[in-house]
């Protein structure tokens, strides 16, 4: 477990899924400004079959309340969401800092261009735009961000 002020990052366990999924969806919809047409069952399947096996997943807790989650590998951040109403309280930064510490010295991630809050958050977190593109599933412009540790000396 990692603690930063009153935020604790804990290993994901399956008992969190019923709270995590609606929190994830609400945060996504608020940030991107779209309504997700997919049933929660499909999102659950995606989370369990794609996100969990390919990433280390941590939940952010304030006391017993789930306030966010991050799914990351040593190379990338697949998901990072903070519960609506809890932004700008250090929760996202705590999760981002954890992902950086667990990385191989660099990370990449995608977010949607229209999610200006997420773009500003990653840029404050020392991520820079690598490329801009288009995400066909959502039919939205996206941004690929990259970060490299300042202390990296291996030239790679």
Image: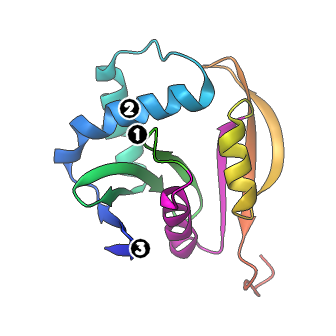
Mark 3: few/some/many CA within 10 Å (<14, 14-19, 20+): few
From the top left corner, tell me how far across and down residue 65 is, in percent.
26, 51
**In the image, farthest residue toward the left:** 15
Indicate which disc, 2 or 3, sits on the residue closer to the N terminus.
Answer: 3
Q: Are marks 2 and 3 in contact (CB under 8 Å)?
A: no
From the top left corner, tell me how far across and down residue 2 is, in percent.
37, 74
Q: Secondary structure at mark 3?
A: loop
Q: Are marks 2 and 1 in contact (CB under 8 Å)?
A: yes
Determine whether, in the image, residue 13 is placed left or right of residue 110: left
40 to 132, vertically: above or below: above
Q: Which of the image's four quarters has the N terminus?
A: bottom left
Distance Cα–Cα, label 2 vs label 3: 32 Å
Q: Going 25% across and 61% down the picture, which residue do you hit?
A: 63
Determine whether, in the image, residue 56 is placed left or right of residue 108: left
Residue assigned mark 2: 46
Q: Going 40% across and 51% down the picture, which residue do you hit?
A: 69
115 to 77, vertically: above or below: above
Q: Secondary structure at mark 1?
A: helix
Distance Cα–Cα, label 3 vs label 1: 31 Å
Q: Going 59% across and 32% down the picture, which residue do you hit?
A: 31
Mark 1: few/some/many CA within 10 Å (<14, 14-19, 20+): few
* Magenta-tinted stretch: 88-112
């Amino acid at each position: 477990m990692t603690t930063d002020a009153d935020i604790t990052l804990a290993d994901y366990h399956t008992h969190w899924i019923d709270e995590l999924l609606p929190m994830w969806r609400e945060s996504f919809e608020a940030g991107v400004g779209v309504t997700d047409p997919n049933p929660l069952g499909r999102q659950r399947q995606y989370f369990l079959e794609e996100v969990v096996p390919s990433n280390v997943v941590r939940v952010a807790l304030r006391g017993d309340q789930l306030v966010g989650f991050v799914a990351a590998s040593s190379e990338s951040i697949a998901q990072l969401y903070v519960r609506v109403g809890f932004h700008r309280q250090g929760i996202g930064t705590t999760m981002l800092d954890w992902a950086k510490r667990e990385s191989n010295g660099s990370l990449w991630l995608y977010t949607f261009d229209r999610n200006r809050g997420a773009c500003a958050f990653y840029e404050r977190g020392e991520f820079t735009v690598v490329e801009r593109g288009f995400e066909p599933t959502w039919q939205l412009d996206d941004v690929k961000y990259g970060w490299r540790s300042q202390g990296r000396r291996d030239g790679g």
